[in-house]
Amino acid sequence: MRNLFPDVKKLVSFYYEGFRDMSAWGRKVWLIIFIKLFIMFAILRLFFFHDFLHDKYANDKQRSKYVLEQLTNSATTND
């Protein structure tokens, strides 16, 4: 098996050089992309996607039983 370190070093160098030589417009676009991703995965999750299983069931065994029932019931009703 060959050493993967030179490949990782090339990959990091590729992206580092690309972002370093990027225009101001390109940097603004990437900043907007990162802000949107942060909003989608952090902010929206906090306010709209609560932990349903944690609220409804007390332990992991009950949660896993519920998930298994939901998966098997939906599989049988979609036949």
Image: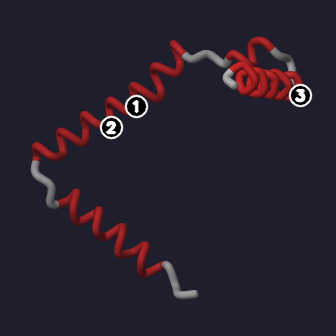
Identify which residue, 43 or 63, lies in the foreground.
Answer: 63
CA separation, marks 2 and 3?
37 Å
Position of 44 with respect to 61 (left or right) is: left
Query: What crowding class fits label 2: few (fewer than 14 Cα within 10 Å), some (14-19), or many (20 or more)?
Result: few
Label 1: few (<14), some or many (≥20) within 10 Å? few
| Above or below, 33 relative to 5 | above
Alpha carbon distance from label 1 to label 2: 6 Å
Q: Which residue is mark 3?
A: 61
Q: Residue at x 56, y 17 (%)?
A: 49
Horizontal side of residue 13 vs 22, given as left or right? right
- The image quarter in which residue 68 lies: top right
Q: Mark 1 highlights which residue?
A: 38
Q: Which mark is residue 34?
A: 2
Task: Confirm or deny contact between disc 1 and disc 2 (CB under 8 A).
Answer: yes
**Pointer 3 local density, CA inside 10 Å: few below 14, some 14–19, many at least 20:** few
Relative to 42, is 18 above or below? below
Mark 1 secondary-structure assignment: helix
Q: Measuring 15% from the left and 60% from the top, which residue is drawn there? A: 21
- Name the residue at 87% across, 22% down: 62
x and y, in percent, of residue 36 in the image: 33, 29
